[in-house]
Image (cartoon, rainbow, N blue to C red):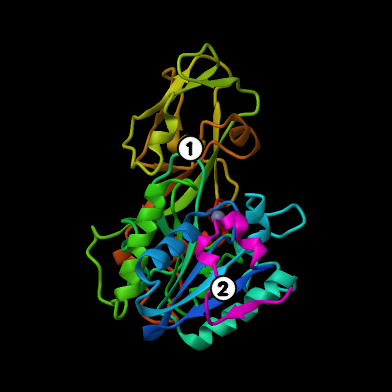
Amino acid sequence: MNLIELDHLPVGLLERPASALHHVLSGPALIHLQGKNPQPLFVTVLQHGNEVTGWEAVRRLLKSHYEFDELPRSLSILIGNTHAAKYRLRRLDDQLDYNRCWPGGNHDDSNIGKLFQQVTERMRSLSPIAAIDFHNNTGLNPHYAAINRIRPEFLHLASYFSSKVVFFKMPRGAQSLALSKFFPSTTLECGQAGDVHGTDHCIGFLETCMHLSDIPTTPLDADDVHLFHMVATVCVHDDVLFGFGHVPTEIAFRENLDVLNFQELPTGISLGDVNGGPEWPLVATDIDGADVTSKYFRFDRRQIETIREIMPSMLTLDRRVIQQDCLCYLMERIHFEDHIEVTDHDPLPEALRRSDRQGLPSL
Ligand SMILES: [Zn+2]
């Protein structure tokens, strides 16, 4: 597979939805557009073929604002998996997950891994102001940014998109993780694909980045960014019969469970009723695989009650996801002021070093 590299937009490209890009682009394409400020913004869309918000934002931005005007800054656009986009799939069965194939992952020798190595070297030579990778997820989750280094410029960049920011070091081979070595980078989770508010939000964010002269390296106020990291995965015990709402199952979760996503829950919040079944109907596992259920929940008052402040994410009402994957992830706040990297050689603080093994599976 060869990288397609262009210095212009192919005719009619902006008219095409993600599912029709494959007619023009037979594989990943890196397109450089010149702007007034020559230092480019690097934007990646469609690493996952069904996550179309980034492409919708880029093409609407370019069509409405810049078709006849000069761009305020140069723009390098990587359009990822056009084959999977044709079928509206994250990836095809015979493809690797593109967002696991950036340098430093487990697929550096694959065709797509080599291609992304080439993109990385090319973009390093252009020293972009930042790298932005657009994604969507399922379920009711707010828009949030994810970063891989706790430095003021990463936090500022993320804060232009959302005050909710997640720190992660896994999965290896994710783009923002690979590029964070070289310039500020972020992964943006833009809600559900096809939601027009997501597109509007991304256009506003891109406009902001296009007009920045640089990303500040000044300290942030504690309230500018709420930074979290994942501390545990929660599954429903295999033997438990569960349902949602007023149902006579052993566990009856709240009907609207997913409204709790990215809400910081105080102690004593109920996720649902316990009507029977095993003594420990949920199982929380930390990043080392240890059972930490009793640290987060109690079940002895016919309720699933939280017993410390936590923030769930990716809570879902989809039974198949719950049975095959998990019920949710638990996040905890990081006081970023205490963990700011000052030089390039700062090791991660001990409290976060364990996060080498934790991640955000959805990206
Ligand atoms: Zn994705």
In this picture, which residue range is highlighted in magenta?
Answer: 1-24
Q: Residues within 10 Å of mark 2 (few under 14, many from 20)?
A: few
Residue farthest along the right direction in this orientation = 94
Q: Quadrant of residue 104?
A: bottom right
- The relative height of residue 103 versus residue 306 in the rendered view (above or below) is below
Q: Is residue 10 left or right of residue 224?
A: right
Q: Is mark 1 within 8 Å of ligand 1?
A: no
- Residue with the mark numbered 1: 315
Q: Is residue 325 magenta?
A: no
Q: Quadrant of residue 225?
A: bottom left
Asked whether 309 or 172 is in front, the reply is 172
Residue for point 44% across, 37% down: 296
Distance of label 1 from label 2 (alpha carbons): 41 Å
Asked whether 30 or 19 is in front, the reply is 19
Residue type, label 2:
Pro
Asked whether 115 or 19 is in front, the reply is 19
Q: Label 1's element? A: loop
Q: Label 2's element? A: loop
- Residue with the mark numbered 2: 10
Asked whether 111 or 193 is in front, the reply is 193
Q: Is residue 7 magenta?
A: yes
Residue for point 47% across, 45% down: 192
Task: Indicate which quadrant contains ligand 1.
Answer: bottom right
- The answer to whether residue 340 is seen in the rendering is no
Coordinates of residue 121 in the picture (x, y in percent): 58, 84
Coordinates of residue 340 in the picture (x, y in percent): 34, 71
Q: Quadrant of the N terminus?
A: bottom right
Coordinates of residue 320 in the picture (x, y in percent): 63, 32
Coordinates of residue 15 in the picture (x, y in percent): 51, 61
Residue for point 49% across, 42% down: 314
Residue for point 56% across, 32% down: 318
